[in-house]
Image: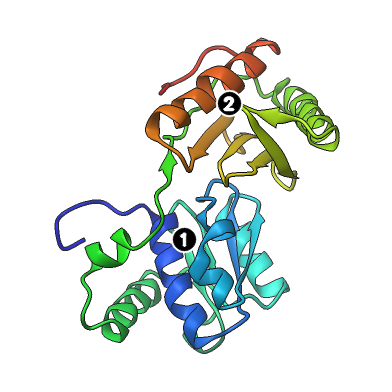
Amino acid sequence: DDKGEEIFADKIGLMLARDLSRLHPNATFVVDVKSTGLYKTDAVLKANGAETVYWKTGHSYIKRKTAEIGALAGFEKSGHFFMAGDLGHGYDDGLVAAAAVLAMLDRNPGKTLSELKAALPDAWTSLTMSPHCSDETKYEVLDKLVAEYVKLGEEGGSICGRKIVEVITVNGARVHLEDGSWVLVRASSNKPELVVVVESMRSADDMRDLFRQEMKPRLAAHGVTDYNQEI
């Protein structure tokens, strides 16, 4: 941004969605399962009638889903943006994405990029953690973890004192909690690893608790303990 601070792609996508949803009420956006939970809870998107669909990580999946459901745009956390309709042709073109950001700034002449970012609600997102799990076993282990989370959700279970309100299973298990926080476990599509991400709407310490008190022991119960990095 104008202060030299990095803005991750899912937050840029949210800023664009906020701006575009004013111009296109009741628009639908597609984001991948590693993206911030603010798409679900953001008051601006709700006020503009916007709907967000969480889908499989991978630019081909997001591109296909965006076209399939007629979404206005798709945003992948890795930085692939798909602008549809009058905004673009639906594929991940970097120049079109850059133009969309410039158009957003043009429509908000009194605000800098850092100010648009500061207007977003607070959310503390972990780095992406990739514990080793062999290609021969990772999908079997993941199936067991998904089943556990689905069962926990159906039974009215909770994580770190918060009730589970939704378990999205299109790509592993993304478990949404009543305060908007969430945890994710999925299988890497190209490495012998699982992928773990957590996000807290409370604090950085709570984000670490979601990993250390929930995700880490649950995966360890299935023999998954060797992480490339931890929080």
| Relative side of 215 to 147, left or right | left
In this view, the residue in front, 45 or 87, is 45
Residue 132 position, x and y percent, is 56, 19
Q: Which residue is mark 1?
A: 80
Q: Which residue is mark 2?
A: 193
Render colour scheme: rainbow
Residue at horizontal 61%, vertical 36%?
Answer: 184
Which amino acid does the dot numbered 2 rest on? Glu
Which structural element holds mark 1? Answer: loop
The reply to whether the C-beta atoms of the residues labelled 1 and 2 are less than 8 Å apart is no
In which quadrant of the rendered view does residue 164 lie?
A: top right
Badge 2 local density, few (<14 within 10 Å), some, or many (20+)?
many
Which structural element holds mark 2? Answer: loop
Residue at horizontal 21%, vertical 80%?
Answer: 110
**Nearest to N terminus: mark 1 or mark 2:** 1
Badge 1 local density, few (<14 within 10 Å), some, or many (20+)?
many
Identify whether 14 is placed above or below 20.
above
| Relative side of 44 to 63, left or right | left
Which amino acid does the dot numbered 1 rest on? His
Is residue 73 visible in the rendered image? The answer is no
Identify whether 56 is placed above or below 29.
above
Residue 100 position, x and y percent, is 37, 77
Residue 231 position, x and y percent, is 40, 23
Residue 193 position, x and y percent, is 58, 26
